[in-house]
Image: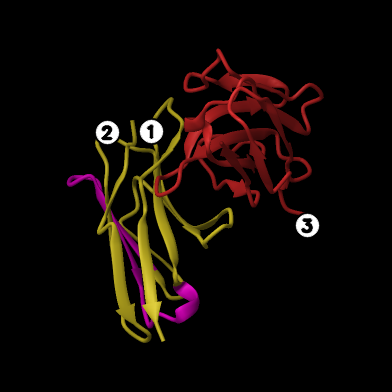
Amino acid sequence: SQQGEEDPQALSIQEGENATMNCSYKTSINNLQWYRQNSGRGLVHLILIRSNEREKHSGRLRVTLDTSKKSSSLLITASRAADTASYFCATVSRGSRLTFGEGTQLTVNP
Amino acid sequence: EAGVAQSPRYKIIEKRQSVAFWCNPISGHATLYWYQQILGQGPKLLIQFQNNGVVDDSQLPKDRFSAERLKGVDSTLKIQPAKLEDSAVYLCASSQPGTMNTGELFFGEGSRLTVL
C-alpha cells in the first residue's frame, strides 16, 4: 500500500502564481523526498528533507515537514509553464523501502 | 555523467507473450531498483538489488515476473506470460553507494508496455 498521499490530486494555476501541494503519511519516517515527473518521462529528484528538519529551500522550492502531523508541503513560487508536471512525495521509514504517493498533477497556464 | 539507460522505450505485445526490459544504472551505483507505474498512479517498487543480491522483492509477482543483475551492473526484468494488467511504465532507478533507502534515486526514462 502507498505510504504517502498527495493533496490535491490535480491543481491548475496561472503562470506567476504559487503552487502548494501537500503530502500526508502514516508511519514514522527517516526522510521524505519530492520528485517531479514530466509527461512520458522518468522521475527527477527535487528535494530531500530529513525527519529532524522542519523546512528546506532549493531555488523556487520550499518544503516543510511536520512530523507531529505526519505531513509535508511543497511550495513552488512564481510558477512557470515549464513547472507543469506530476509531483510525488516519497517516504523512507526505518527498515523499509522508499514508497511513493499517488501524485499531484500540476498544470501551469501561460 | 551518463544517466540511467533503459530499453526499449516502448513495447506492445499480446497477452500471454513474454517481454524483457533492460537497464544500465549510473556507473558506480550499487543499488538498482525496478518500479512499475500504472497510468495515473505513483511508482510501486517491484525489486531492489544491492550489487547482484536481491534486497527486496516482496512486491514482485514471482509467478510471472523475474529480474536479474548477474554481474552487479546492468539488469533485466522479464514478464512471462504477460497479462492485460501488466500494461504500465517500468522504471529503473539507481542510487549511490551508502544511500540505499536514504538518499535520492536517479531514474531512467522508463519502458512503456502495452499488453493487448
- For disc 2, the neighbor class at 10 Å (few under 14, some 14 to 19, many from 20) is few
Residue that protrudes farthest toward the left in the picture: A69
Labels 2, 1: one chain: yes
Which color scheme is applied? by chain
In the image, is A31 to the left or to the right of A68?
Answer: right
Q: Position of residue B99 (x, y in %)?
A: 58, 39
Question: On the rendered image, what quadrant is the C terminus of chain A found in?
Answer: bottom left
Q: Amino acid at mark 2?
A: Thr
Distance Cα–Cα, label 2 vs label 1: 7 Å
Q: Secondary structure at mark 2?
A: loop
Q: Secondary structure at mark 1?
A: loop
Using the image, tell me which numbered label, if any, was put on residue B1: 3
Using the image, tell me which numbered label, if any, was put on residue A15: none
Residue that protrudes farthest toward the top in the picture: B63
Q: Secondary structure at mark 3?
A: loop
Tell me which chain appears yellow.
A
- Is there any visible trace of residue A19 in the rendered image? no
| Picture layout, residue B108 above or below residue B64 | below
Using the image, tell me which numbered label, if any, was put on residue A93: 1
Q: Residue at x 55, y 48 (%)?
A: B104
Distance Cα–Cα, label 2 vs label 3: 36 Å
| Picture layout, residue A90 above or below residue B31 | below
Q: Which residues are magenta?
A: A62-83
Q: Amino acid at mark 1?
A: Ser
Q: Which residue is mark 2?
A: A27
Between residues A96 and B92, which one lies in front from this camera angle? B92
Between residues B104 and A102, which one lies in front from this camera angle? A102
Q: Residue at x 54, y 44 (%)?
A: B103
- Considering only order in the chain, which callout, 1 or 2, is on the residue closer to the N terminus? 2
Q: Residue at x 52, y 21 (%)?
A: B60
